[in-house]
Image: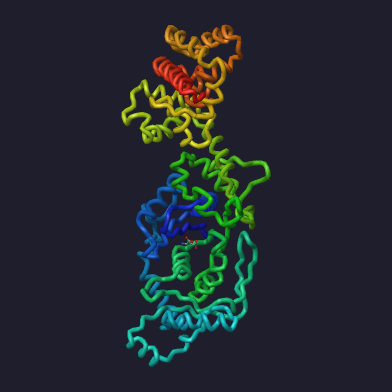
Amino acid sequence: MNQVRVRFAPSPTGYLHVGGARTALFNYLYAKQNQGVFVLRIEDTDLVRSTDASTQAILDAMKYLGLDWDEGPEKGGDYGPYFQSQRLELYQQYADKLLASGRAYQCFCTPEELDQIRQEAVEQKRDPKYDGRCRNLTEAQRQELIRQGRKPVVRFKADYDGTTLVDDLIRGKVTFDNNQLDDFVIIKSDGMPTYNFAVVIDDALMAITHVIRGEDHLSNTPKQIQIYEALGFSVPQFAHIPMILGPDRTRLSKRHGATSVGQFQEEGYLAEAMVNYLALLGWSFDDSQTLFSKNELIEKFTLAKVSKNPAVFDLAKLQWMNGVYIRELSLDELYEQTLPLFQGWGFVPTEVSSELVGKVRSVLKILQERIKVLSELREVSYYFFQDELHYDEKAVRKVLGKEGAVEILSTLLPELLSVTDYTQENLEPIFRKAQEQHQRKLADIIQPVRVAVTGTNVSPGIYDVLAILGRARTCQRIKDTLALIKSRQEGSLGV
Ligand code: GLU
């Protein structure tokens, strides 16, 4: 059997979206599993909408996910160029072949004429298809139209008889009636190929054996098969993977929140979690296993187990999974992944002193279990790094509004100021002592301090928090909070 060659063929008209990334992943897994070749081809024939920035964003997102391609941009390969815009001569050459063999013809219809054809079809309740009126132009007529300055497109002479069978590895045998087809354009009047034409020429010349792509292209497949056959190319195997829907079961789009892979990366999703989650969008191994390393996916992925039904993108599940992967990181790995974030937020400078390294690591250690997305760290750790505290009003009212809060904070303050070593072990007895003194539950002693130093009533263990904050910051915040309560009471606003 021939070596497996698959491709991912994004159009660089935007960022890499979750759906595209999932298509890329399935191709990657299939290639790796079969010791095949994974080709990346940039379909940039839409000159207006294609941008270099988008190509770069796609390459970056693929690298972040670790979907290394074997041939393509930056890599080269024997089947290049890998940008469609650099392959225009090839498309022209094959269009000429079809023109010469009579399977294509020049069409000179103006947009107005095409509009009219469409309207007439609609009025007569027919499919609005091109009626083939330029199919049989005589050479003289052609010359005359060219003389008039009309710029022709090239249309494929479709075969309207019978049916075209798409034997799809996921969807099974799907039969299309050829009378649904029309003589579709393969080369536009500006000389650019259309998608359906370029994709066939490229897949054939790049010796692609399996076309794994989104189901939205299933309906294009009969047209493509007719071109393969007209040119005597062998037809690859097709595998159309199901669409991805939002929770409201409409096609996943920006309306549903982040959909670009780059955005997930920025928000602090780990590549391992993204890859694992994307693999489950339309594929499953069995009913029980949800966590898969990339190597496990390479081993276990099969097209046969890809579902025909659409997959629903479940952000909560992705977040859960990301949390699982975050907890699996070693402290060193977590530090490495998050240091740039802390620097970006201005929590730590570019040059990190060893003392600060220690502090960041301590913060990470107590927060690792508590976050699902790395970017959450900003909100739950800023108070370790920045002076200004943002009080959560609800927590202030609930905790500092309670009777005794001022007294509790006032008893603790001098103790915290004077304790010899400001460590977890030394701090705990201070709280126990205050508990006895005030005859309250330990939580009643801890909560006012928690709100005073973190601004909220939820945080990691208080002794850890205080030890990392250090004496000066803790005591300053308690003083500030006492002053805040006082000023509010004086203003009789209540706390
Ligand atoms: N450029 C096409 C797209 O992004 C590729 C489709 C295909 O894989 O054939 O939809």
For image coordinates 37% across by 61% down, the residue present is 81
470 vs 97: above or below: above
446 vs 389: above or below: above
Question: In front here: 355 or 471?
Answer: 471
Image x and y of residue 167, in percent: 61, 66
For image coordinates 40% across by 32% down, the residue present is 342
Would residue 176 be found to the left or right of residue 69 on screen? right
Image x and y of residue 344, in percent: 37, 36
The residue positioned farthest toward the right in the image shown: 287
Question: In front here: 432 or 271?
Answer: 432
**Colouring method of the image:** rainbow
The number of numbered badges drawn on the structure is 0
Image x and y of residue 6, in percent: 50, 57
Q: Is there any visible trace of residue 217 in the rendered image?
A: yes
Quadrant location, the N terminus: bottom right
For image coordinates 55% across by 49% down, the residue present is 33
Image x and y of residue 369, in percent: 54, 29
Q: Is there any visible trace of residue 468 in the rendered image?
A: no
For image coordinates 57% across by 54% down, the residue present is 244
495 vs 438: above or below: below
Question: In front here: 113 or 309?
Answer: 113
Would residue 484 be found to the left or right of residue 120 on screen? left
